[in-house]
Amino acid sequence: MSLITLDRLAPGSCAVLRALKNEDLMRRRLQELGFVCGTKLQCLGRSPGGDPSAYLVRGTVIALRQEDCREILVEEFAKGESPWD
Amino acid sequence: MGLTKGSADLGELRIRRKHENDLVVALAGNPNVGKSTVFNGLTGMHQHTGNWPGKTVANAQGYVQGSHRGYVLVDLPGTYSLLAHSAEEEVARDYLCFGAADRVVVVCDATCLERNLHLVLQILEARSDVLVAVNLMDEAKRKGITPDLALLQERLGIPVLGLVAQKKKSLAALPALLDTYVPPSSLAKVPPIHYPPPIEAALADLIPLLQAHTTERQSPRWLALKLLEGDTSLLGELQWQLGEEVLSSPTLVTALDTARERLKTEGFPPETLADTLATATTLAAETICKDVVCENASSHSKRDRWIDRLLTGKYTAYPLMLLLLLAVFWITIRFANIPSAFLSQCFEGLLEWLTRLLIHLQAPEWLMGLLIDGLLRVPLWVISVMLPPMAIFFPLFTFLEDVGYLPRIAYNLDRPFHACRACGKQSLTMCMGFGCNAAGVVGCRIIDSPRERMLAILTNSFVPCNGRFPALISLISIFLVGSGAFSGALAPLLLTLCILLGVLMTMAMTKLLAHTVLRGAPSSFALELPPFRRPQLGRLILRSLLDRTLFVLGRSVTVAIPAGLLIWLMTNLTIGEMSLLHHCADLLDPFARLFGMDGVILLAFVLGLPANEIILPIITTTYLCEGTLMECESLLEMQTLLSANGWTWATAVSVILFLLFHWPCSTTLLTVKKETGKWRWSLLAAVLPTVVGLLLCLLFTQSLRLLQQI
């Protein structure tokens, strides 16, 4: 399985967070919200303009902009594979 | 729309104890976990609440009586962590870590305990006298989440209490717990977070050096961590707390350098140290939560996701937003007329009765004029015109707010605001502006980046506040909507168009500012979309009536009384043949005509600076004093009066445009000064909408004239 940036994760798909490359403040903010390595994420959908997108992280829904997601590396789960087990 | 009594109070927090042995209890927690609801329930105060992160923008304090001592409760703004990003969070952090609080109660959301524990663990690292209140237990239960609080208490080693903050009975347990609580000595406790062994070793080296200098409340372990991490935002505060000589003492400096050097060789260089610490905290929260929360994942937020797909869907989001806006206005306009007419009838009767009474008492004519036309008529007009729409509009808006719709608006509108190089949260402060622009300006504190915050502050008055709605509604109903078959639907539609124009102008101005005065790249953005909550209708209506409607009404009446007097004086003081008021109006008249208005209208806008609510009453009062008509209560009479003074639908359009875009009220200007620290920003906030309004009016009037000539 290869790494993709979070913005390329399609709505409905799940992934595991592998690396945060955002600048300091945003990286810290994301960590507080539960985005740390190994965390499971699900893309819930995109806002009507196509950006930002909503992600399910540790039971909460967080909206992030595409440009911030480009700095987040995730490993996508294959289709049909449920990450929540 | 966080307009409450407390929101205008921006000063520094001064603790008011009633007795010497009263304890100061800080309420901390993530945004939107119900801190304000806990605070209100315990203190009986009306700090504004709502289902969106960041509405508590100013610290509030209240008093709770325990069995043998009292507690001063301090409601802190929500934070995700002790690392401060915005000015807002810095306040909360300094208060928690260094402030005067004797106890800290961390309010947590039972539906997402794990994220909340992150903050609990961080605070627990900094101090030991911490209690946890897990709120929204009922909400969690509905979602099939049942946290084992006894286990949580055992794992954390501090008291944990389950709460349903809306229920008084459940809240009473909190002061009772505080009564019996004995804080542990800071040295006895077990560290809540375990870091990788090399970091623990470094800490073990540093702690003894700090121990001698810390007070009982300061945790040497936390201080050592912060020093290792080199958090620059804390350095000043640390210096002040510990004393310069401690921080710069050679032993400590050498020890820190050695520790950092060693960590570097062991794979923890300074640049990733903070990440390691944050990750450890998250993982510690995860470990604790794994056993405490057994959640039935299948039922979890399935309904929420379905609603979200509708409210934020590609094809449904914008139409639904428009429909909701339209529905709110339709209900407001449709149902406000009836009580409005009733009230004005009552007041007319009252004034008539008073007049007869004064005639009976043989009061001099000037006194009658002063009392009835000067003192009473304008405020009564304001009440009969403003109270009904507000009493309908505010509860409706509070409903949308409590359900959790506002963050969805921010989510939907982030793209356009982003394109204007601003923050999506600006749409939240814009929504607050619909209630009151001053409150909207204060609300801008939720925006982290100073540049984006300034953009939001300066453009806030481009959306009409509640003070302008009644006038807009009246003018639209009188001049732009006939009595045809569709008139009932046309008025809300036109009002919605006005709002859309305001929103568009907000974006255009934001973009203009972002490319000129406030240049810069848009900052990053992370917005939580909270779960939908079922609002309690009874409380909602009561609160929106008490906190908002009466507050706004009170303010406008207070302004209306002196304004009414001033106008009465100006109409009755004559220079030569004409009253002072008409001299002023005549002076402004040629200028005003350029923009499709007349001198009286422009003068009313100038005199209406204290509050927009009184602009229309000033116009009618001024016309009335020419003696053509004596009263103007119903819309029909107002139409007759305005038409008699040369108003056409074109005049109405110009006035509506200028109502939408002109200088904000004096309260808002004052608030801008307070929030930005400089009068020149207030000036800009006044000049921008005025120029836009005048340009639009000029464009409209002159092109209409051209068309009519052809």
Image (cartoon, helix red, strand yellow):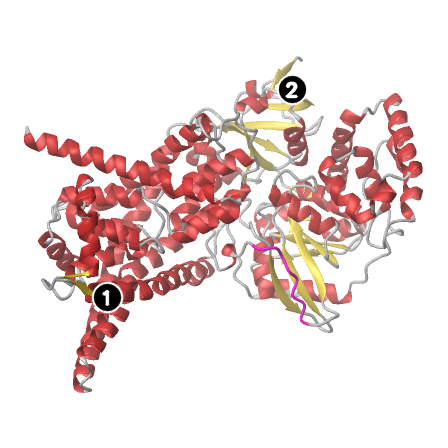
The crowding category of the residue bearing disc 2, from other C-alpha atoms within 10 Å (few below 14, some 14 to 19, many at least 20), is many
Q: Is residue B17 magenta?
A: yes
| Residue at 18% in and 64% down | B574
Q: Amino acid at mark 2?
A: Leu
In the rendered image, the residue lying farthest to the bottom is: B361
Q: Amino acid at mark 1?
A: Trp
| Towards the viewer: B166 or B664 | B664
Image position of B188 with respect to A35: above or below? below
- Residue B507 picture quarter: top left
The percent coordinates of residue B48 (x first, y second) are: 51, 55
In the rendered image, the residue lying farthest to the top is: A2
| Residue at 79% in and 50% down | B127
Q: Secondary structure at mark 2?
A: strand
Image position of A72 with respect to B150: above or below? above
Quarter that holds the C terminus of chain B: top left
| Towards the viewer: B84 or B183 | B84
Q: Numbered disc 2: what chain? A: A
Name the residue tied to disc 2.
A73
Mark identifier at residue B568: 1
Write down the region rendered in magenta. B11-18
Q: Is residue B586 magenta?
A: no
The crowding category of the residue bearing disc 1, from other C-alpha atoms within 10 Å (few below 14, some 14 to 19, many at least 20), is many
Q: Secondary structure at mark 1?
A: helix
Q: Numbered disc 1: what chain? A: B
Q: Is residue B560 left or right of residue B547?
A: left
